Image (cartoon, rainbow, N blue to C red):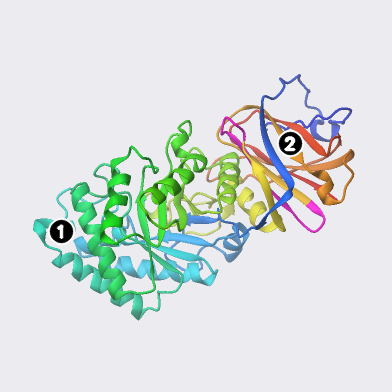
Amino acid sequence: MAPLLFLAAAGASLLSYCNAVAIEPRQSSSQYTYVNLAVNTGTSVHRASGVLYGVPDVQGQIPSSFYTGMGFNYLSAGGAQDPAATGWIYGGYTTRFLEVISNYETARSYGAQFILKMSDIWGADGTQLTTAEWPGDNGSYTEFDRFLAQLVSDLKANSMTTDLKILIWNEPDLGTVFWYPGFTRYLAMWNHAVTYLRTNLPGVLIAGPAFANSPSTTNTWWTGWLANIKANGTAPDVYDWHLEGDITNSADDLQTTQPILVSMLESYGLTVGEFIIDEYGTSAEQVPSGAAWWISRLERFNMYGLRGNWASGAQLHDFLAGLLGKPDVDDATATGYFANGEYNVYQYYATTMTGYRVQTTGSTDRLMDCYAVVGSNTVRILVGGRLTTGTYELVIDSISSLGLATSGSITVHTYQFAYAGVYTASPMTDLGTVVHTYTGNTLSFPIYQTSTTTTWAFEFPF
């Protein structure tokens, strides 16, 4: 049984939550996450509902209800890790591009935007040999230009320039996993590709640098790349990077990295444009609590995010990046899909949390956060811990902005999102209601986070 959340206000009954479960004394909270109902931050467009790969190459294999249910609005793909389609450098370009067409058409059928991982179509998807051909080998870009010309021609011929962003190269800073020739060659390749694409594919946005490491004034890949794009006029239209590192490291958190990149761009005299995290969340974080934490962060900074994908081979192209299961997970074309516990968080976020967003603040330890919306007559709050346990306090300020009194009582309805594994169904659980008293225009109650994976949503009418 998943741990229960006990919401104890003075005089409030826990019977509807506990049934036969014993209530144990809990320590008081020293960490708080806040909601300010008086500050409207705009309508949500479900910025966290993107996925890296996760979409089968056969259109319609995953039923449409799973796409619409999670608010699917962004897809990044490039045919990676298909043994039958090895990319340009190994003669497998055509099959890989056909997979891209299928994924693009799936994305567009749901109104989702598409990020094309150009390096994956080239063949640099982590499966390539170190002896593989790289752009600029022996000082020549002849083969790379043949590839770019074919790619541009095919994108135009298949009407694939709408809502498309081209990601030049994936994680070139991650050792030699996706880029072997070194930093100087990377800069030269970047400049060459951007110049070619801007000339031959005008109007299509370019995304980058897609570094594995977060922006930092001490990271020479970032500082060198920024200096290079300023000097050569090759800045991308969209800045993107990945956040899939150490959860205890403040550098792997938008709260740290977003302001740093803004400052760095300004210091280099570059325009501060759109930011995207096109891979977010470690494998361990892909649980209900982690999903809610990331949703809260991305919504606060008004940034689109795409879930990281930790599968490989055929499974990389399935399961909406770890949100679904099916009876035969090893059969690439099998169906019978069902939602796991984490999917339910996205479904609640995308379909139930309607209305306008309000201001939120995460805990000072960076491990608990919340996302809140005000609907026509209901407030909904999703909380999420970043693989943490302990006691946290949810503080909801400015109750009177809803037309309610500054003191009184509020009936809070709670829903639990538990997790039983990536390929195991785990439905949302209705935990019932508890009446809370409040004063001083503020309602607060503790969150007893006894599990690193379970999370909760709270609703109350006004």
Q: Give the residue pinned by disc 1.
A: 136
**454, above or below 379, in the image:** above
Q: What stretch is highlighted in magenta?
A: 363-378
Residue 370 colored in magenta in the image: yes
Q: Give the residue pinned by disc 2.
A: 395
Q: Residues within 10 Å of mark 2 (few under 14, many from 20)?
A: some
Residue located at (29% from left, 77% from top): 153
416 horizontally vs 410: left or right: left
The quadrant of the picture occupied by the N terminus is top right
- Nearer mark to the viewer, of 1 and 2: 2
The label shown at residue 266 is none
Can residue 86 be seen by looking at this rendering?
no
Residue located at (55% from left, 68% from top): 110
Q: Position of residue 83 (x, y in %)?
A: 29, 57
Residue located at (19% from left, 49% from top): 184
Residue located at (39% from left, 44% from top): 215
